Image: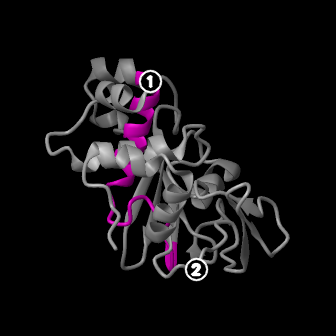
Amino acid sequence: MNTEPKSLQEAIVYFSNPDSCIAHLVAQRWPDGVVKCPTCGNDKVNYRAHRRTWTCSSHHAKREFSIKVGTMMEDSPIGLDKWLTAIWLLTNCKNGISSYEIARDINVSQKAAWFMLHRIRLAMQDDSFGSKLGGKVEADETFIGGKARNMHLSVKARRITGTGTKDKTAVMGILEHGGMVRTIVVSNRKKAVLQAEVKKHVEAGAALYTDALLS
């Protein structure tokens, strides 16, 4: 039986039950019903009903995980009821919706609503709604920014304050073979920063092809 909410009132009631939220997200994230550890990809996990979390049978860091881990909701203190109602609102309002409307409808601050809408819209850019990339994946990084010799003198004086990559922006690209491409602006090209982005966007067990900086 289809229990998907058809109105805002139904969405608020349906998602007010945390177990309904988890069941809904499990069906979206693991359509085959097999929950997998987002850290190692192991499907031997035990559900802890009193905490509403799973524990991976493999011994490693972060072996206990919630439904939020590996999604746009990870590290957010905002409850699933508000997240899923906000998603419902954004996907069902044909003329769009503002952070002020979200804030009023789900009772959060406008700043929190803006943060949620930013993440939801970013996740909606691909068909898998922000899911991680898998299979064969390539990752690389570079700097972007105009060449000094092509700039007008006034622009060059304003924008070029050093040599090399000082005035360029570091970006990272992640390509899933036969699938999606993601680009991310990163603070720098340090190994820890780049590896953190790989973990955020690439599922455990994927075949990853990188250069020396990411290895």
Q: Position of residue 132 (x, y in %)?
A: 50, 65
Q: Residue at (51%, 80%) from the top-left corner?
A: 135
Three-letter code, disc 2: Val
**In screen coordinates, is 74 left or right of 10?**
right
Q: Is residue 170 visible?
A: no
Which residue lies under the disc numbered 2?
34
**What is the secondary structure assignment of the residue under circle 2?**
loop
Q: Residues within 10 Å of mark 1 (few under 14, many from 20)?
A: few
Whole-Å distance between the Cαs marked 1 and 2? 36 Å
Q: Residue at x 64, y 48 (%)?
A: 193
Find numbered disc 1 in the image and state the secondary structure of the residue it sits on.
Answer: helix
Task: Answer with left or right where residue 213 lies relative to residue 178.
Answer: right
Residue at (32% x, 49% y) in the render: 10
- Residue 125 lies in the magenta stretch: yes
Q: Where is 30 relative to 187, above or below?
A: below
Q: Is 67 situated left or right of 149 in this image?
A: right
Q: Nearer the viewer, residue 89 or 95?
A: 89
Q: Is residue 157 visible?
A: yes
Q: Position of residue 6 (x, y in %)?
A: 25, 54
Q: Nearer the viewer, residue 47 or 114?
A: 47
